[in-house]
Image: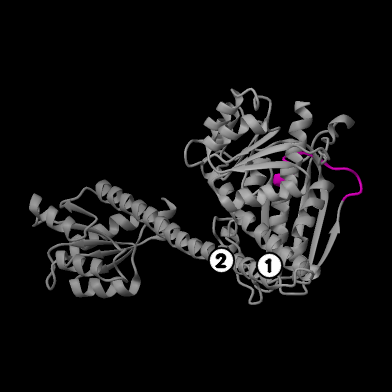
Amino acid sequence: MTSIDQDQLILNVDDTDASRYAKSRILTRAGFRVIEAATGAEAISKARGEKPALMLLDVKLPDINGFEVCRQLKDNTDTKTILVLQTSASYIGTSDKIRALEGGADNYLFEPIEPEELVANVRALLRLGHVERELREVDRRKDEFLAVLAHELRNPLGPIRNAVELMRSLDPNDRAAHDQAHQTILRQTEHMVRLVDDLLDVARISQGKLLLQRHPVELRGIIDAAIETARPMIEARQHKLAAQLPEEEVWIDGDGVRLSQTICNVLNNAAKFTRQGGEIELSAERRGDTVCIQVRDNGIGIPPEHLDRIFSMFAQAGHSTDRVKDGLGIGLSLSKTLIELHDGTITAYSEGVDRGSRFEICLPLLARAPAENQTSAPESAAGKQAYRILVVDDNYDAAEIISELLRLSGHEVMTVHTGNDALAQAAGFRPDIAILDLGLPDMDGTMVAAKLRQTPEAANASLIALTGYGKQADIERTRAAGFDDHLVKPVKFDHLIDTISRLRRAGA
């Protein structure tokens, strides 16, 4: 007996008592719940009231024939999802079966029917019905997600546009007002970048292409980075955050960036679903060969029926009336995937609505701390030396902004917007660095890179791909074309400067 057998209700419709009794007995013994009807009108009434998963429908009825009953069910919004398995001992021609199927029946059997055949057909249809319901639910959640995505992407655009308009009207000497507008643009841009990054992570996960950069990492550094990232939202909602961590070092074999992202997602979730002025506690403790990180809040809680699906993609279990950003509903799903990729677990607990929530992340510990020379990677510092930099991008605004920032940093910059112009100017400009977009109007950026490598004046230049294409295949393509690094738009300017300095030091 399957769980589907136990959960689904079947309406058995037949005006012959003996036949109806026999089919009901077969289905009941197979584990199904069965109700009965003897006429077409009774069948339609019970279908609307009882909402069976499947109707076993004889064609020959005393009032309305089964073909018409099926048509009425399928034409009604409330009953159209009920599966219909039509049976008949009288209408046994191919044309009868075709008429039934074209009228909306999901299958058609000629009587007499062997008990095993009847049960097998019912179970097969219920499996199909289960899949259809899942697909409808996925489609519904997709529509909700697209609506939320449009809302979340529009939210930052308003402040950005208004800040730009404000800066045009401000007194050029009012440095404080300009700085405030500038910070608004930076905050809202960072919010949009996080949304896009989450969407890209979802795509990588669905394609099985999310890769971890695992190495020994210390827990405190991971948690400190997560708190620092989540702090603006926590402070904006005036929450109190208390953290309690082990005094000794705790080492994990993991991707520090991804683990910090996961803990930050949980902290942000606690901040969003806790009313202003709430309390959030973060703690970590060793349990045998694992370390468990807990985030507690006194927020709106999670209804018991939602605990099982809180980590599903696009799921959002509740709404706090004073919350500005609901997010896309993918943060916890990403967190679950990332933790499982680290051989860990993440679990949600709540005693119900307005009783707060607790999330627990458990990860395996390293058997021993790494050697001292493995504990940290060297940090890159922005260099002071000025370079000749060629910027190639057909987006005029993007190219000019990057170029102007580089000039303000002391570099000599030439800006062009096509591949041919880049090749034409490279000989005279002799760039130390070339920053290339890939989607140029006249030729692909990889072709420009290959031709620059063949030019004596630019053969030793460091080539940086700055593009919106960020899949692993794109990175491999630029590496094969001779690029020294691959940066995905939008890139933080400090990161671009660090990349330039690192590449030139390596070249030197």
Residue 324 placement (x, y as % from top left): 64, 71
Q: Residues within 10 Å of mark 1 (few under 14, many from 20)?
A: many
Task: Quickly name the residue at label 1.
Answer: 272
Give residue 154's mark: 2
Q: Position of residue 26 (x, y in %)?
A: 29, 55
Q: Quadrant of residue 459?
A: top right
**Disc 1 secondary structure class:** helix
**183 vs 39, nearest the viewer:** 183
- Graded by Cα atoms within 10 Å as few (under 14), some (14 to 19) or many (20 or more), the crowding at tag 2 reads few
N-terminal label among 2 and 1: 2
Residue 219 makes an appearance in the image: yes
Q: Is 79 positioned to the left or the right of 310 in the image?
A: left
Q: Element at badge 2? A: helix
Q: Is residue 163 above or below residue 447?
A: below
- Across and down, in percent, residue 1 comes to 41, 50
The residue type indicated by label 1 comes to Lys
Magenta segment range?
246-259
Q: Judge whether residue 256 is colored magenta.
A: yes
Disc 2 marks a residue whose amino acid type is Arg
Q: Quadrant of residue 338?
A: top right
Task: Determine the residue positioned at 79% across, 71% down.
Answer: 174
Question: Is residue 57 inside the magenta stretch?
Answer: no
Task: Name which residue lies at 81% across and 45% down.
Answer: 219
Report, in whole angstroms, how far the alpha carbon at label 2 lies from the one at label 1. Answer: 19 Å
- Residue 301 x, y percent position in the rendering: 67, 69
Viewer-side residue, 76 vs 189? 189
Compared with 458, 236 (above or below) is below
Residue 169 - label: none
Q: How many dots with numbers?
A: 2
Q: Residue at x 54, y 55 (%)?
A: 313
Quarter of the image that includes the C terminus: top right
